[in-house]
Structures are given as C-alpha cells and as structure tokens.
Image (cartoon, rainbow, N blue to C red):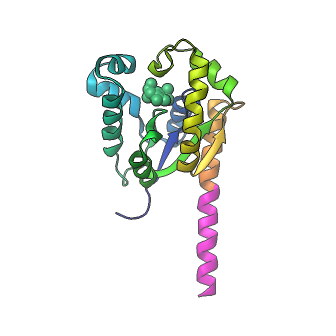
C-alpha cells in the first residue's frame, strides 16, 4: 500500500504529555484511541513494571512492535506510543505509514516533575532517576526529531492546548496541500 494513513501518532519521552494529549485529541475528534502500553499490558495481563520485571525489556519491546503492527493505514485513530517506540527503526517506518507523527517535547525540569508523579516507569527505577532521564533523553532526542512530522513543546500548554495545536497544524497542512493542488491544476 502506498501513501499515508490519517491517524495521529504521538511519540515522545516519558512525561511529554502523550497520554493526556491523546485523550484530549480523541475527545475532540471522536476518533478511536489506542495506547501501545495498554495493548501490551492487556496482552500479558500484567502492568508495565511487572512485564519488565518478569520478562525483561526485550520481550516488552517485541510486544510493543507487535502492537503497532495491528494498526491499519485504512482506519484513522489516535495512537499514543510508549517513550521507547523510536528505538527500533522499523517501528518508526511503520508509524510513519499510519499518519502524521507528532513529537511531544518538554524541557528537562518539566519532564522530571511530571515523571516523578508516578513511580510506574521501570527504566527510571535507578539510584539517580534524573541522571538516567538525562542520559536516555540524550540518546533518544535525535530519534524523536527524525521520526517526527511535527514537533511541539508542551511545557507551558494544557492538554487541550496541545490537542488544539496539533489539530490546527493538520488543518494548515490540508489547506496548503489543497492550495498546491489547485495551483498545479491552474498551470495545466
Ligand atoms: C518507556 C516508556 C513508557 C513505557 C515503558 C518504557 C520508555 O511509556 O512504555 O515504561 O522506554 O521510554 P510512557 O512514555 O507513556 O511513559
């Protein structure tokens, strides 16, 4: 199949606001809404920390890849991914066929504050979670950037504002594509 689907795919580091923005987008668009973490969790019948503890990160990553392979280019949806989805280039390739990939970002302070609210991130259960976070960010930032069609800093935005900014961007893109098309047909 060629072209790209109509889904909105949210990527970004833990604490970037993907889940909250996904819920707001689903409410505003009425599109079906999926979280890869929920799919993986349901598949094992375990929480994410339990999956990491019992089966290890690699098995979690395999299940994560299987989760995104279930999505279809023909069904528009809001797809919220886990922060590590970009670690496999094949995941990124697949996500980009599904629709517009939006990288949600935030400054280090904001990310750490948001992450600290929940102890459910197995990768950050280290002696110095902040240092671990910074290290992981350094590795992943270039991956988020190169995977993204659109990047959005959520540090000072509410969930609704994030969703509105994404929807506005999609509208702008549609208008500019329509304008380019009509310009082309005028020239013909
Ligand atoms: C992970 C992020 C988590 C979850 C798992 C691994 C990561 O999702 O998938 O703990 O590697 O960054 P969130 O980004 O929703 O926290």
| Residue at x 64% of width, y 49% of height | 168
- The quarter of the rendered structure image containing the N terminus is bottom left
Left or right of 128 in this view: 81? left
Residue 163 in view in this figure:
yes
Q: Is residue 182 highlighted in magenta?
A: yes
User: How many numbered markers are drawn?
Assistant: 0
Q: Position of residue 134 (x, y in %)?
A: 61, 27
188 or 122, nearer to the observer: 122
Query: In the rendered structure, does residue 15 fall within the stretch colored magenta?
Result: no
Q: Relative to residue 120, is residue 179 depicted above or below?
A: below
Residues shaded magenta: 172-188
Height in image: 169 above or below 81? Answer: below
Q: Quadrant of residue 137?
A: top right
Residue 170: horizontal and vertical position, in percent? Answer: 59, 53
Observer able to see residue 79: no
In the image, taking residue 108 as reference, residue 65 lies left or right, namely left
**Which residue occupies the extreme right position in the image?**
156
- Lateral position of residue 48 relative to residue 143, left or right: left
Residue at the spot 46% in from the left edge and 32% down from the top edge:
82
- What secondary structure prevails in the magenta region? helix
Residue 127 point in image, percent of width and height: 54, 11
Q: Residue at x 36, y 54 (%)?
A: 74
Q: Residue at x 47, y 20 (%)?
A: 121
């Amino acid at each position: 199949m060629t072209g790209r689907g109509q889904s909105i795919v949210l990527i970004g580091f833990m604490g970037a606001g993907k889940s909250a923005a996904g819920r707001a987008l689903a409410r505003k668009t009425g599109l079906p809404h999926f979280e890869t973490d929920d799919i993986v969790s349901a598949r094992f019948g375990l929480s994410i920390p339990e999956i990491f503890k019992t089966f290890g990160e690699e098995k979690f990553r395999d299940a994560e890849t299987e989760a995104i392979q279930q999505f279809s280019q023909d069904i528009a949806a809001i797809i919220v991914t886990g922060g590590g989805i970009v670690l496999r280039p094949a995941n990124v390739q697949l996500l980009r066929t599904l629709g517009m990939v939006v990288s949600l970002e935030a400054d280090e302070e904001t990310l750490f504050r948001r992450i600290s609210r929940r102890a459910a991130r197995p990768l950050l259960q280290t002696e110095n979670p902040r240092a671990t976070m910074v290290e992981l960010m350094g590795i992943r930032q270039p991956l988020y950037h190169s995977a993204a069609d659109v990047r959005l800093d959520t540090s000072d935005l509410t969930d609704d504002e994030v969703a509105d900014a994404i929807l506005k961007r999609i509208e702008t893109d549609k208008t500019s594509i329509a304008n380019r098309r009509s310009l082309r047909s005028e020239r013909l």
